[in-house]
Image (cartoon, rainbow, N blue to C red):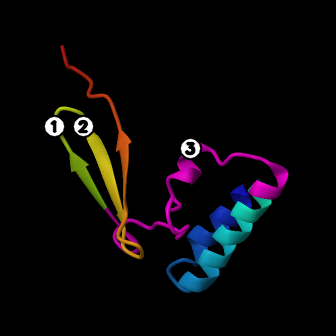
């Protein structure tokens, strides 16, 4: 799975369809073997449509700082938003 995701990252700028196919294969292998993706790989795939997310090309990334600070990732294929919450470190 990790190797397929690395290949998808290398190929994405040249052939987005091939990169998407690598992601689909990685997800199928993970489902068949009942293995979870690591967090850093899960955040590279849209939860809703399964598209490979490349910031600035296939997704938009925004930081929201309010009561609960989070990173908002918007998939440009299906227009869905995913939120990843984080804790703010206090200096001092």
Q: Residue tagged by mark 1?
A: 66
The structure residue drawn at horizontal position 31% and vertical position 47%, both measured from the top left corner, is 71
Q: Main secondary structure of the magenta part?
A: loop
Q: Is residue 49 above or below residue 91?
A: below
Q: Is residue 79 rendered magenta in the image?
A: no
Separation of marks 3 and 1 at Cα, in angstroms: 24 Å
Calculate the distance from the C-alpha at mark 2 to the C-alpha at mark 3. 19 Å
Q: Within 10 Å of the Cα at label 1, are there few (<14), some (14-19), or many (20+) other Cα atoms? A: few
Q: Which numbered disc, 2 or 3, marks the residue that appears first in the sequence?
A: 3
Task: Indicate left or right for 5 with 92 as reference.
Answer: right
Question: Where residue 45 sits: x, y (%)?
Answer: 53, 61
Is residue 23 left or right of 78 when viewed as pictured? right
Which label's residue is closer to the chain start, 3 or 1? 3
The residue lying furthest to the right in this view is 33
Q: Is residue 69 left or right of residue 76?
A: left
Q: Residues within 10 Å of mark 3 (few under 14, many from 20)?
A: few
Q: Residue under label 2, please give it.
A: 69
Which labelled disc corresponds to residue 46? none
**CA separation in Å, label 2 and label 1:** 5 Å
At horizontal 76% and vertical 56% (from top left) the residue drawn is 31
| SS class, disc 3 | helix
Assign a secondary structure to mark 1: loop
Look at 58% across and 84% down and name the residue there: 17
Q: Which residue is mark 3?
A: 39
Instruction: Look at the image and give the residue range highlighted in magenta.
Output: 31-60
Q: Residues within 10 Å of mark 2 (few under 14, many from 20)?
A: some
Residue 14 on image: x %, y %: 54, 85
Q: Quadrant of residue 90?
A: top left
Mark 2 and mark 1 in contact? Answer it, CB < 8 Å. Answer: yes
């Amino acid at each position: 799975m990790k190797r397929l995701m690395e290949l998808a990252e290398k190929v994405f700028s040249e052939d987005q369809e091939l990169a998407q196919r690598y992601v689909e294969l990685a997800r199928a292998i993970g489902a068949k073997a009942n293995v979870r993706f690591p967090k850093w790989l899960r955040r590279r795939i849209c939860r809703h449509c399964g598209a490979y997310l490349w910031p600035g090309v296939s997704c938009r990334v925004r930081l929201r700082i309010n009561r609960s600070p989070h990173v908002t990732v918007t998939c440009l294929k299906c227009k869905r938003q995913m939120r990843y919450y984080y804790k703010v470190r206090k200096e001092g």
